[in-house]
Image: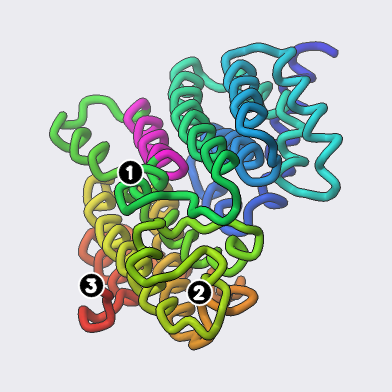
Amino acid sequence: MPPETSAREAREFCRWVLPRVSRTFAINIEWLDPGMRESVRTAYLLCRAADALEDSWPDSPSGIRARFHEFLAALDGDAAAAARLAEGARARADGAEDLGLLAHLPLLLGNLATLSCADQAILRRGVRVMSEGMSRYASRAAERGDAASYLDDAAELRDYCFVVAGCVGVLLTKLIHARRTGEPEEIRRRRLELAPRVGEALQLTNILLDWPADVRRGRSYLPASWLTEHGLTVADLSRPDRPQLRALALRLESLAHAALDEVADYMDTIPRRQLRYRLFCLWPALWARASLRLVHGAPEFPAAATRPKLSRRQLWNRAAGSLPVVFSHRGVRAMLAQDAPRPARRAD
C-alpha cells in the first residue's frame, strides 16, 4: 500500500471512530481549527487507547506494567509492539469500544505520524505522562485487590487527576502555544499553570458521575482516608442504607466545583478572537457544571444503580447558549457561574 494511502486510511479511521467512543468530545473537537482539530482528535484517541489498558484489560501487576511498556514502545515508533498490542486487544475486545480502539493502534499511530513534528512531540510527551501514571496506579491496584481503594488520600486523588486529565490540559495548551508566538511570557506561563486544573475539573466530575458504575465493577476512586473517616469500606459505596455516602458525594462535588471555578481564569488567558478554542474549553465545563447540578438533585445518588445523564438536547442547549457570550471574558465567567452552587451548598 502506498504511504499516502496508508495515511489517508489512518485519518479516515480516526474521523470515523471518534463519535463512536466519545459522546461529548466528538461534538466540540469538530469546532477546532482544522490543523488543531486533527492533532486533538489523535491525542484524544491515543488517550482512550491508554484508558483501555487501565480499565478493560485486567491482569497481574507485572502483566499490566508489561503492556504499558509495550504501549510506550509503540508510541516511540516500535511497529512490532503496536501490532502485538493490537492483536491482543482484538482477541479480547468482544464489543468493548475501548479495546476495539486499541485493536487499531497502528492506525492511530499512523495518523500521529501525519502531524507536524512539533505536534507529534507534544502528543508523545503528554500521552507518555498519562501512560506512566496509569501503569503505576493500575499495577498497584492489581496487587491490592478490589477491596482496597484505588487511591490512598487527597494528595493521590490530585495526582491521579493530573496523570489522567490534567496532563491533557497541559498538552492542549502546548498545542496552542506552538501556534501562537510573540505572546507575553507571563500570559503563557499563567495559562500553563492553570491548564492542569481544567483537566482536573472534568476528571473530578467524571469520578463523581461514574461512582455507581465504578463501585459495581470493584473500583473506587474515593481516597481510602475519606472512607476511614466515615467508617466505610469500598463495598459500602453502593449501599443505600449508608447515609455517609451523601457527605462523601458532596465532598467530591465541592472539589469539582472549585476546580471548575478556575476554568474561567484559564479562559481569561485565551484571546477573544480565538473563538474556536474558547468554545472547545467552555462547553465541557458547562456540561460538567450542569451534570453536577443534576446529580446533586438526585436523592438516590450515589447509591443508585446508574447515574443521571444530561440529554443531547440539554448538551446542545448549553452549547448554543454560550455562543452570544463566548467573545466576552465577563460573559463567559457569568455563564460558568450559572450552575455553580451557592456557598451554603458546598461541603466542607
Q: Can residue 298 be seen here?
A: yes
Tell me the residue that label 3 is attached to.
Answer: 348
Kind of residue at disc 1: Pro
342 w.r.t. 269: above or below = below
Callout 2 secondary element: helix
Distance from Cα at disc 3 to Cα at disc 1? 23 Å
Q: What residue is drawn where x is 26% and y is 67%?
A: 331
Q: Quick check: 34 above or below 263?
A: above
Residue at left 23%, top 40%?
A: 193
- Earlier sequence position, callout 3 versus callout 2: 2
Q: Residue at x 63, y 74 (%)?
A: 306
Q: Earlier in the sequence, mark 3 or mark 1?
A: 1
Q: Is residue 116 inside the magenta stretch?
A: no
Q: Residues within 10 Å of mark 1 (few under 14, many from 20)?
A: many
* Circle 3 Cα neighbour tier, 10 Å, few/some/many (<14 / 14–19 / ≥20): few
Where are the magenta residues, as a range?
Answer: 163-178
Q: Residue 43: give its label.
A: none
